Image: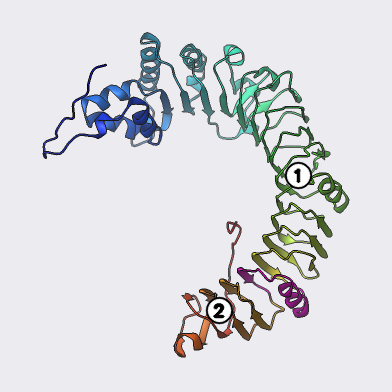
Amino acid sequence: MKRIRARKNVGGGVDRISQLPEPIIHRIMSRLSPKEVVRTSVLSRTWYHFKASYPVLKFNEMHFGDEEHHTNLDKFRQVIYNSLNHFCRNKLALVAFHIDIFSPSLSSDLDSWIRLALENKVKSLHLCVRTESILSVPPTKLSILPQPLFSSKTLTNIKLTMCCLKQPLSIFSSIRKLSLVNCRLKEPIFLKNDDCSFLEHLVLKYCYGFKSVHISNLRRLRTVDVSYCFFSFELVVASQSIQTMYIYARALSKPWSIINIDGCHHLKFLYLQSGTITDKELQSLLSKLTLIEELYLYHCQQLETIYISNPCLKTLLFVCLFHSPLRIIEIAAPSLKNFMYMADSRVCRIKVTGCCNLKTLVLKKYMGPETTFHDLLSKCPLLENLWMVQCAELERLELLNPRLKRLHLVTCSKLNSVKVDSPNLFEFCCTGLKATTIPGVGGARSEYERSSHWYYRLKEVLVHSVGLDFDNLTDLF
């Protein structure tokens, strides 16, 4: 093996970056944009040759436009053909091929580009064909994929955007990750282990044209994401290997007819957004998901009562920023550590039983009586983080918790007294304070504007606060 000598640069230092192995340099290039990859060729002769063998090709038509956003299509075509032919001539394996176009005249070249990429044994393909509106485009003008794409044995990752699929998805026999965004699907989706035995991740976003999704007995499938798909259809999933599932059900004129995921007995993470699910349907669903650890319920506007009894549940989040008829939430989860409630409901009551391990509690627009709130805190001896936002009925807050570390009070308009006895408290945040007395910090007294946010390390606090707007806490978890 030829020994690589360390070269010295003009400043007298050693050029160690050029001595890195080729896989490491390609790994670095994978983190860069296409323009940045081209710029690396000026670092040294070694990097110039590595750029030519970089196994990831990314092309975006927008990068070939002038100041008036007019694309030089001939140059764009020539660059893609030259790059693909270079890999073919040198018999180099292509790891990924990403292309993003918006000119209709380039659709005729897609077939040739994809065929050349498949000849180079490409593993990941990302195809995006942008149009003004997917619903207004006739099927004949959407990109129709070439037949060799479905018979490829090396392709493991496919992401298609604004394409027309006339074949059933089961034809992707060797795919591990399949993502379809804004695609027109002509056939009902039936996926079973005999057809897609290698599939691990399935994503359907903003797709339409199909009436049903049936997934059964896919032994390797781990993640399913069905988000914002147009029109009503039937979703039936029965695969015990699935651990993560996202369901965003848009509330259109025709709601989803069926959401049946009872067969996913090993599901651990569920994100459900549905404006049509009822109390009975949710209760039946949760009774079968006994191993669920994280449950996120977003904008479930038809729910009036939520009863959850699960020994494995660790995180529960309920968000409904529109008017909600929710009246009661009862939770019996000894493993629960994080609970967030954000809803526009004036009659909801929260009752917890056995949630002694709760560490993070977030309440926004909670209108329950003050006694109910203090009863809730008394059942959480291990509470470390407390956020209270727009809790308009709360007038007095007393916290005697040796483990409390963070306390945030925002827009609690009636709150006029806060007493805290927590030796481990190190962060206190409140918006809109006009005056505060902090005995634990030398008894200092300061004036603050209404928009101020402040933090102190302290042991005991006495606060008089006024309310301010506070919009979003959804990224807390």
Is residue 294 left or right of 477 when viewed as pictured? right
Q: Which residue is mark 1?
A: 252
The location of residue 154, given as percent across then percent down, is 54, 16
On screen, 427 above or below 319? Answer: below
Q: Secondary structure at mark 2?
A: loop
Q: Secondary structure at mark 1?
A: loop
Q: Residues within 10 Å of mark 1 (few under 14, many from 20)?
A: few
Q: Residues within 10 Å of mark 2 (few under 14, many from 20)?
A: some
Tell me where the magenta segment starts and ends, as one range.
Answer: 368-391
Q: Which residue is mark 2?
A: 423
Instruction: Specify which label sits upstream in the sequence, 2 or 1.
Output: 1
Disc 2 to disc 1: CB gap under 8 Å? no
The location of residue 143, given as percent across then percent down, is 58, 21
The location of residue 295, given as percent across then percent down, is 71, 51
The location of residue 11, given as percent across then percent down, is 11, 40
Is residue 99 left or right of 335 when viewed as pictured? left
Instruction: Say which amino acid is labelled 2.
Output: Pro
Is residue 414 left or right of 405 when viewed as pictured? right
Does the magenta run of residues contain 387? yes
Quadrant in the picture for the N terminus: top left
On screen, 186 above or below 249? Answer: above
Instruction: Say which amino acid is labelled 1.
Output: Leu
* Foreground: disc 2 or disc 1: 2
On screen, 270 above or below 366? Answer: above
Q: Which mark is residue 274?
A: none
Q: Residue at x 72, y 47 (%)?
A: 272
Residue 452 in sight: no
Residue 274 in sight: yes
Q: Residue at x 65, y 72 (%)?
A: 390
